[in-house]
Amino acid sequence: MKESHFLRYGTSSEQKYMASYQHTYDGIAINGNMLAHISKSISLFVHKDIGKEFFIDPMTHSFQHETEKISSASGRIKSSIKKLIEIYGNPLKLILDEFRPITATDFNTNNIPKFVATVLGFQKDHIRRSLDEEYSDYIDYLEISKEPIFLIAPYFYMQSDRTFDDWFSLNSRMINESIKLKAEYKKDIFAELVIDKKLLCDEDKINKILKTYSDSKIDGLLYWINGFDETQATVDELSAVKDFVVKYKRSNPNKKIISLYGGYFSELLMGISNALDGVVHGLEYGESREVVPVGGGIPISKYYFPDIKKRMPELRMSKILLVLKIDTPVKFHKQICDCKKCKETIVKDVLPDFNRYFKAKPKIIKFKKTGNTREIDYPERESKELCLFHYLEVKNKEFKYIKEHGISDIANELTKVHEKYKEHLNEMEIGHLERWAKVLSDG
């Protein structure tokens, strides 16, 4: 596996963007509940429209949360989650029968082997099985049937509380049982670690995780820290993430480790002696994610500002253009962004041209669970596409830049950018640059 930059498949409407901008990323991450929900669409996309490697997140953590977190406005389990429950089978059917979350004690010696085999089998075969017979015969003839680059052992969310030992023990059993099937499935087996932010700074538990996951025979590790926004994280939290990644890689130099939800800080960890092997994010979003609820959000037009490494709203970006006196396309491309999309867009009058990134139409939204309504400015199609393509172009440049430059030099650059903007923007907007630089420079 050579991939380092993964896009997370979001919705079927995003397929055209992922297909047309394949040059900006290496591979695809697909959530299991999404695959169960629109199997045929995703299978055709993977086989017909895109030439990228992929992996499937089995999303088994979904079943341990309160049922209201995975239910629709009607109070019923969401159809995508229900389909996954039906595919995976027992003991998950207790969720439907008793309308309660799964507990660690629901798994035992009798049901774990079959559950693990089913979860791994879903990842390996479901893409292929979802094709119509006619198209299936076609890909068999051409020998272009695609499978994920690795399989992920079933996993569950862990917090630094009294439930830790139970879920940790179960995760370990799931990993060991998955390893037993490696020869049968002929695929590398990865573990997935999903933890609460508080667990990051619990040294005893983190060391226990590191030792157990390092001693196991897994081929790699994916990690997801609940709601971990790199631009808001403290120095201690950032240092804990860096230390975890570095320690894991030091103990497992031949195993891959990938951040499932990461931004520029995660990208930088790839430059620290190649400690991190890959980063996953969505199309213009998904650099952090809460474990629950299992769902999406409301789209908002924002412009990814390359200097600050985060998406910025229209008013803040307009202020930056004014205070920096960016009044010609040449100045914009030199000081703000010179990506292909920005060069195509900012061609005459800077502010009118730049406003094309933020065009929106008001739309009344009714929230299903509360019944309340709210007017939301939904991005127009052109603005959505401009922001999205700009973001992907810049991300692609970031990954390449980090590979070609030293971390100490990049840390110095972050400090300089912080100095440049501290008179114009508040610390909430740029403070992360200084924190990142400090963590990168320490040890």
Image (spheres, rainbow, N blue to C red):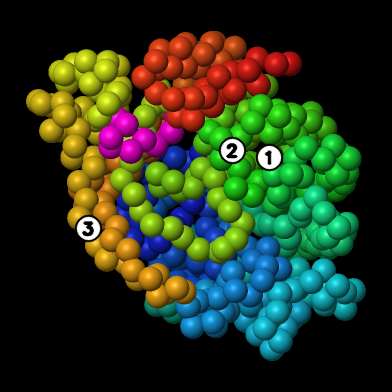
Residue 146 higher or lower than 125, as above or below: above
Label 3's element? strand
In the image, 169: left or right of 328? right
Mark number displayed over residue 434 = none
Q: Which residue is mark 1?
A: 257
Q: Residue at x 59, y 38 (%)?
A: 278
Q: Is residue 4 magenta?
A: no
Question: Is residue 344 or residue 277 the one in the foreground?
Answer: 344
Q: Which residues are magenta?
A: 309-317
Residue 350 higher or lower than 48, as above or below: above
Q: Nearer the viewer, mark 2 or mark 3?
A: 3
Q: Nearer the viewer, mark 3 or mark 1?
A: 3
Q: CA distance from mark 3 to mark 1?
A: 42 Å
Q: Residue at x 72, y 57 (%)?
A: 157
Residue 442 higher or lower than 60, as above or below: above
Mark number displayed over residue 362 = 3
The image shows a total of numbered marks equal to 3
Question: The disc labelled 3 sits on which kind of residue?
Answer: Pro
Mark number displayed over residue 278 = 2
In the image, 188: left or right of 133? right
Q: Quadrant of residue 356?
A: top left
Task: Estimate the x, y position of residue 428 in percent, counting from the top left.
Answer: 49, 30
Q: CA distance from mark 2 to mark 3?
A: 38 Å
In the image, 217: left or right of 359? right
Question: The disc labelled 2 sits on which kind of residue?
Answer: Gly
Residues tagged 1 and 2 counted as in contact (Cβ below 8 A): yes
Label 2's element? strand
Question: Is residue 355 or residue 177 the one in the foreground?
Answer: 355
- Disc 3 crowd rating (10 Å Cα; few below 14, some 14-19, many 20+) is few
